[in-house]
Each structure stands twice: as structure tokens, then as C-alpha cells.
Image (spheres, rainbow, N blue to C red):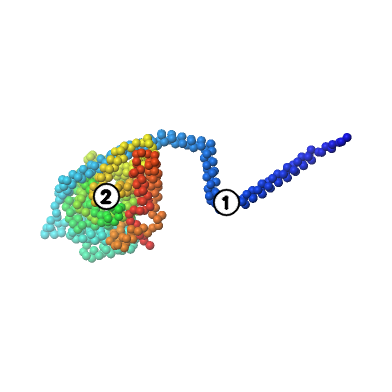
Amino acid sequence: MVIFKKEPAVTRLSVISTQALAESRGGREREREEEEEEEEEEEPRVMEGSVSTTVARYIDRTYDLLSSPSTAEALSRVAAVFEVVRAGVLVPLLKVAVVLCLIMSVMLVIEKLSMAIIALYVKVFRRTPEKIYKWAPLSQDPELGSLSHPMVLIQIPMFNEREVYQISIGAVCKLVWPHDRLIIQVLDDSTDLSTRELVQEECQKWSNKGRNIHYISRDNRNGYKAGAMKEAMDLDYVKKCDYVAIFDADHEPPPDFLLRAIPFLMHNSDIALVQARWKFVNANECIMTRIQEMSLNYHFKMEQQSGSSTMAFFGFNGTAGVWRIQAINEAEGWKERTTVEDMDLAVRASLQGWKFVYIGDLKVKSELPSSYKAYRYQQHRWSCGPANLFKKMTIDIIMAKKVSLLKKLFLLYNFFFARRIISHNVTFLFYCIVIPFSSFFPEVIIPKWGVFYIPTVITILNSIGTPRSLHLIIIWIFFENVMSLHRCKAVFIGLFEAGRVNEWVVTEKLGKALKTKQVSTAAKRSPNKFWQRCLFLELGMAVVLLICALYNFIYRSNQYFIFIFPLSLSYFLMGFGFVGTHIPAAK
């Protein structure tokens, strides 16, 4: 009989656990050894292409994430939401934008056509100011001598104008007018002490030659140009003067300037301002100055001429003009509330019932900004200031009692709204935003007359003022479209009185450097590093427009890419600084 001995359960479990634990440890050790062997084998490969391996792993993980059912479902939901937003918001919004831009385009083209018709009428029928107003040359009276000439004050405001101060001072001191009936004020707000010394020496030189010239400087720039002229007008000897002529530092009036302008004021008691035209000494410096010449010639030949011939009103250009001091005083003098103190004074004087005269054949030499940076600052001031003034003076114009309803409408609609608000906004919003972005929305249809015919008419009207530059008209179109970005932005800054609303940067001048081959040659080379010249706002617009052009070229049949591609290229060129001249930085 065999008797089996029963072992305790605890002992059997202990044996089994010990064996399982040993096997588990052995398995983990074998796995660890295998992993170490695999890592030793893969280590050289990882070291050789660690970057590419990491990128590949991220791509794999991204692909797995995107291809997962949950991600696909989320993307489909996003796409569905976008389609709803696109159909319910973006398409209607873009359609509304198209309608508004078309309305503004029609308003603008009507405004430009009306000015062109008036200017053509004046030219064909020779309706010169001498035929409209009383004018007679000043007669020489032996008994009265120089007393037959009224006392005239001349103001030359300047700020660090080292290159051009001699131009204006010398030209003013050579004006044909009795020296004892002429007072010259050089208003120098320069912060550069060496420039101040040079200007003061120039004034002293002409004073030694018998000119009644006063050098006036301030220890601050309160009110900028308007502040300097306002303080100078308060001096006692100014009370002896009847008229004041104003010239910027780079302006060079002809010797007979006063002889031609003053008689209008003497023989017509209701005339407050006589404005001359600018003639540009550096128009051929570069393509940018040629384009500026086209735009400014249009301004003088169309805007100033039509305003003078119809409503006896236009915006004072801030220089190359003669004011009746009585009119300045009645309009409460120079004000510092905007960066367009000249336009501000002109509007206030007009509301007092005064008339203005523009003399198109009286030309004053001046200089155009030849660097893109200087031009951008100038255009910001010229676009922001009028918009800000429009906001400040709308109520004053409506409530004015000395002018007719017709003139109020002219000031509010023609002078401010159409020319200073609509013109800048429609150029940028329509041609740089709405038309390019319509490529993504086949539902949005823009009529051909809005895309092609109206811009063609506007372009032709702007170019006829400068026939010699007709071959540059395509370049002018794209240059103006790029500049419309800054003008449109400046308009909204002026309307909403944002941060840069009162920014005043004096336009950089070359002056004497234009006449020296060494400096002029150096100016055409960029001394700055490439990336320091980059303008990211322009470059950002260039990228956006390039995407729109590519999409239009691939998916649409309206061929807008023919316009959008070169527009994008223009933004790239100007964004990388390949426009204008580059002034060597002082070391």
C-alpha cells in the first residue's frame, strides 16, 4: 500500500511563485539585452540622419493624427462650418464691398471728369486770372518812390535743412522789390546746432548786403511749422505789412514773383490768397520722381485750376503763395491742430467769404523727395491731415453763414469727401483687396466697366498733365496702387485720430547734393544691408496678392491674374526697397 504524502498548499504556491518570478526576471533581462543589441545596431544610422529621422517621425505621427477617424470627423465639421460662414457671411460681405467700391469709383470718375472739363475750358478759351480779375503792373511813381509798393513780409520756415537753406534765402533776397518795403523772416527750428550756425551766417551775409532779414529760432518745436509762423506773425514790425509770402526751404521763386502776384491782392479787395505752381528741379532723378511729377502736375493743372476757376477756392499748398494778412487774422491765424495747417487756414478763410486765385504760369522751383522713405512720410502727412481736418471742420462748414449752400456742398463733398476720402479708399480697397479676393468666390461677379473702363478713364485723366511721361503710365498705375496702402491707412488714422495722427516728419531733401556727381552717385547705391531695407507691410501684401493671382490663374477664367501678378511684383519691389534713391547714412 502506497501512501502519498500530501504537501502543504502554501509550499506548492511558494514554489510556483518563485519559478514564475525567475522566469519573469529572465524574460525581462532577455528583452533588455535584445533592445540594447538593437539600439547598438541602430545607433550609427540614427547618428547619421537624426534630423531626417525626427522629421519623419513627426510626419508619421501627424499623418496618423489626421487620418484618424476622430480627426477626419473634426475636419469635416470645420469644413462644414466654413461653408456656412462662406455662404452666409463672406460672399454677401464681398458683394456689398463690390457695390460700395463701384459706387465710389463712379463718384471719383465723375469728379475727375468735371475737373478735366473745367481745366480744358480754361485752356481753350484762355480764361487766365488776368482776364477774370483786375490786374495791372505796379507803376513807378517818381514822387512816391518805393512807397508805391506795399510792405511785404516773407517767411521761410525750415528744420535742419542743411542742403537747401541757401536756395530759398538766396532766391528771396534776389526778388525784384524795393528792399525797404520787404521784410524777410527765416524761421529756423533746427535741432542741429551746426545747421543753425550755417543758416545764421547766411542771413548775416544778406543783411550785410542791405536786406532786411531776420533770423528767428526757437528752443522748441511746438506746433511745428504752424507754431513757428504763428509766433513770428505776432512780432511788432509785422503790423506794418499788408501781405505775407511763404516759401519752404527748398523752394526758389523767380525774381518777378511778387511783381506778378501782389497786383491781384492790391486791385481785388476780396482776394485772400494767390497760389503759384511748383516746378520740379529733380523730376528726372529716378522713376519715382517722374511718377510724382505726373501726380502733382495733375493736382495743379486740374484740381487747383478747376477750384480757382469755379468756386474761387482750393487748398493752399503751404508754400509758393502770398496771403493777405487781414484774411489770416479774420480766420483766427495759424492753428496747430492738424499736420495740414495750410489747408486748415485756407478752409477757415474761405468760410469768411475770401477768394483764392491760382496762377498756373507762375512757377516756383522745388524739389521732390527722391527716397521712398521720405515719400512715404510725406504721403502719410498729406493723407492723414486732410481726413483729420475734415472730421474737425464738418460742423463749422455746415454752420458757416458767410458762404452759399453751393460752396458748402463743394467743400464737404468735392474738396474733402471725394478727393481726400474716397479717392484713397477706393484705390486700395477695390484694386488691392476686393478684386484679388474675388478670385476665391466665383459667386461674386464684378462688371467689366468697373474693372476696366473706369480705371482706364481715371488713368488717362491723370496722365494728360504730363505728356512726356505717358510711356510710364503702367508703372504709375502700380506705384499708385502700392502707395494707396499707406494713404488709405493714413485716412483712417486721421478720421479716428489714432496714434500717428499728428506725426510730423520733415521731408528729406538733397538740395546741393543733386548738383554734385559724387554725392548723387553715392545716393543711388544702397549703403544699408538688404534686410534693413525690407518693409514688411508691403511684403505681406505682396504674398497675399501672389496667392490670389496663382489661384485666379489656376481656377478662374476672368483673367484677373494679368493685373494681380504685376501688382504683387510691385509690392515685392517696393517692399525690398528697390525704388527711389538711397541716401548714404551719416557715419
Relative to the observer, which residue lies in front, 274 or 465? Answer: 465
Coordinates of residue 478 in the picture (x, y in percent): 32, 47
What secondary structure is found at the residue carrying circle 1? helix
Dot 1: few (<14), some (14–19), or many (≥20) neighbours within 10 Å? some
**Amino acid type assigned to the residue bearing label 2 in the image:** His
- Quick one: quadrant of the N terminus? top right
Coordinates of residue 479 in the picture (x, y in percent): 32, 49
In the rendered image, the vertical position of residue 333 relative to residue 64, given as above or below: below
Q: Residue at x 22, y 44 (%)?
A: 116
Q: Residue at x 55, y 46 (%)?
A: 57
**Amino acid type assigned to the residue bearing label 1 in the image:** Val
Coordinates of residue 316 in the picture (x, y in percent): 25, 49
What secondary structure is found at the residue carrying circle 2? helix
Dot 2: few (<14), some (14–19), or many (≥20) neighbours within 10 Å? few
Coordinates of residue 397 in the picture (x, y in percent): 27, 42
Is residue 233 at least partly visible in the picture?
Answer: no
The numbered mark at residue 381 is none
Residue on which the image places disc 1:
46
The CA span between labels 2 and 1 is 62 Å
The residue lying furthest to the right in this view is 1
Relative to the observer, which residue lies in front, 560 or 221? Answer: 560
- Quick one: quadrant of the C terminus? bottom left
